[in-house]
């Protein structure tokens, strides 16, 4: 039986985490928690900005995405190659960027995601998938 390669996560540098934290919006709706193991911000249960490896990610409107992607170091966000997250973009090497520029995209992201419907706890539970454990047997599917 073939074994899967062990998944390793590249952590964001302490300097990037510190920069990200220093740019935190003061909006009372903002909640900081981890997504994919990296610091991220949520509003109404929806991710609007976060870190992924040494990049900063943002969820933006279509119009803002078009403007954002014109920058050097900007790209559509793929947490894994070939697995694009629709609506999300990333900015490589945010530590080399102007803080005002980063604050602008954080603000645009918060403004946009703040208009989206809140995620209900029921929906979050329904879409959550249990973590597969090596050697664990799957429960049989229930038939209607």
Image (cartoon, rainbow, N blue to C red):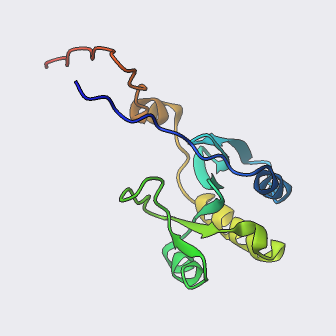
Q: Image quadrant for the N terminus?
A: top left
Give the mark count.
0
Q: Nearer the viewer, residue 95 or 22?
A: 95
Residue 71 as seen in the image, left or right of residue 21: left
Taking the spot 61% from the left edge, 83% from the top edge, the residue there is 71
Q: Position of residue 52 (x, y in %)?
A: 60, 54
Q: Position of residue 116 (x, y in %)?
A: 54, 57
Position of residue 23 relative to residue 72, above or below, is above
Q: Image quadrant for the C terminus?
A: top left
Q: Position of residue 25 (x, y in %)?
A: 80, 57
Taking the spot 20% from the left edge, 19% from the top edge, the residue there is 141
Q: Quadrant of residue 130?
A: top left
Taking the spot 39% from the left edge, 36% from the top edge, the residue there is 5
Q: Residue furthest left?
A: 144
Q: Nearer the viewer, residue 90 or 103?
A: 90
Q: Nearer the viewer, residue 107 or 97?
A: 97
């Amino acid at each position: 039986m073939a074994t899967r390669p062990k998944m390793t996560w590249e952590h964001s540098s302490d300097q990037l985490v510190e920069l990200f934290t220093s740019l935190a919006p003061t909006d009372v709706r903002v909640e900081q928690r981890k997504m994919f193991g990296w610091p991220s911000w949520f509003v109404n249960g929806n991710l609007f900005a976060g870190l992924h490896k040494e990049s900063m990610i943002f969820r933006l409107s279509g119009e803002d995405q078009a403007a954002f992607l014109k920058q050097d170091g900007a790209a559509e966000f793929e947490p894994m190659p070939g697995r694009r997250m629709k609506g999300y973009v990333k900015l490589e090497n945010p530590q080399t960027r102007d803080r005002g520029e980063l604050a602008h995209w954080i603000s645009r992201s918060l403004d946009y995601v703040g208009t989206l419907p809140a995620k209900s706890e029921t929906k979050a539970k329904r879409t959550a998938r249990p973590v597969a454990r090596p050697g664990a047997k799957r429960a049989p599917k229930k038939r209607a």
